Amino acid sequence: MSVGKEGRCACGQHASIEAHDAERLTEHMVEESLLRALMPHAQTRRAVLGVVGAGALLSALGDILPLGAVKALAQGAPGPLEKKALKIGFIPITCATPIIMAEPLGFYAKQGLEVQVIKTAGWAVIRDKAINGEYDAAHMLSPMPLAITLGAGAQPTPWTMPAIENINGQAITLAMKHKEKRDPREWKGMRFAVPFDYSMHNYLLRYYVAEHGIDPDKDIQIRAVPPPEMVANLRADNIDGYLGPDPFNQRAVYDGVGFIHLLTKELWDGHPCCAFAASRAFVKENPNTFHALLRAIVDATSYAAKAENRKEIAAAIAPTNYLNQPEVVVEQVLTGKFADGLGAIKDVPDRISFAPFPWRSMAIWILTQMQRWGQVKGDLDYRAVAEQVFLATEAGAVMREMGLPVPSGDSEGFDVMGKAFDPADPAKYLASFAIKHA
């Protein structure tokens, strides 16, 4: 190792030889761990590396995996931010709580970032502005980065989902005239809204009615309606109900035009909904900024997860420039103490929860539903797509760095309406459904 002036390393980017060697050691460990994960058998690994070489293989992988970001996260102390002033688009719903509250409560500033969160009209606009580079990152529905990457509904563009924003937090709301129609088998001919075709709302509504023998494409109508327009459409009798995000379920109750039929946690407790998302290009080109941004999001999400902070958060995000809702409506959602529209007061503390870790098993489940309803055709390597999009490794590194508990793996099984999902065998799960249009 040659040394520059005043004991600096030859590359000139470190204060000492020791600092240079420490960074290279970390990078080497990341590269070695990645190669071992991709090729766990030593004999296979040696054979492949003997043909193409480690450098060439890692260079090729760099086109599909954010190696720079992984290395920056592994260092724990990234270098200067490539970009400080950022724009993040959001839809005004409580699912975006960490992304929104991080501005007024100082979580972005804490990481040296100057972030402008921009209220946006609908999910298609969010997607298009993000793809066009008008937003540096965005609040997205958790299926959207998968759809964007696969080219479902848009030109295929490599996208990432470094963190889940919220789990649970949705509901099926029906018009008051349907308060005697609590059995989904009586819903034939009814008109429903969901926020977007590529949404947990769409998949959960379809799953729910199909389990009751209702074909969502033949027996009912489902259309995409931006969340802020759902209550008005219910009031105008343009729809009979919706599976949508809050605060618009609670707002329908507040306005006296609807009631909460059920919370989606009753279908799948712990299901993902919205997420923090960024293009793979942004992650690759701005690893230090990405690290800082992910730290801010994880920090805000952890803060929002604590029940004692919910009233403060409700006051911070209710104003016009954010959710534009009565504070009491937002507070009912976040605290879980709410009126259901049928005369009952419910106490469900985990009506909405916040947990950042992007389980890849969640991605695999979403992909099965995209195939089930014909949004994705042909064979699909579920695990490979999940690994490309749901950045569990990067999220885990930041969580560990911040002293938060980190799962030992990146996939786990779960139940949806009492039916077990095994992420190791998604094809069998998909084949098990009587109603599907794959």
Image: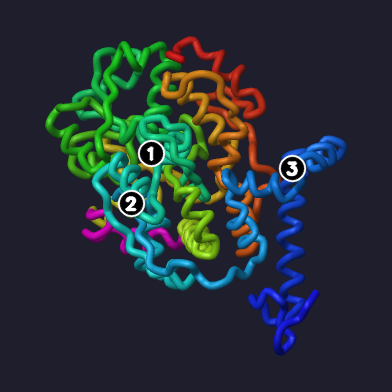
Q: Nearer the viewer, residue 187 or 146?
A: 146
Q: Where on the picture, by quarter, is residue 143? A: top left
Name the amino acid, label 3: Ala
Q: Where on the picture, by quarter, is residue 189? A: top left
The secondary structure type at the circle numbered 1 is strand
**258 relative to 305, above or below:** above
Name the amino acid, label 1: Gln
Verify CB contact (< 8 Å) between mark 2 and mark 3. no
Query: Where, quadrant-wise, is the N terminus in this rendering?
Result: bottom right
| Residue at image coords 39%, 32% | 198
- In the rendering, which numbered label is found on residue 37? 3
| Residue at image coords 35%, 54% | 135
Task: Check disc 2 and report the residue beneath it.
Answer: 90
**294 relative to 122, above or below:** below
In screen coordinates, is 438 left or right of 223?
Answer: right
Q: Nearer the viewer, residue 414 or 30?
A: 30
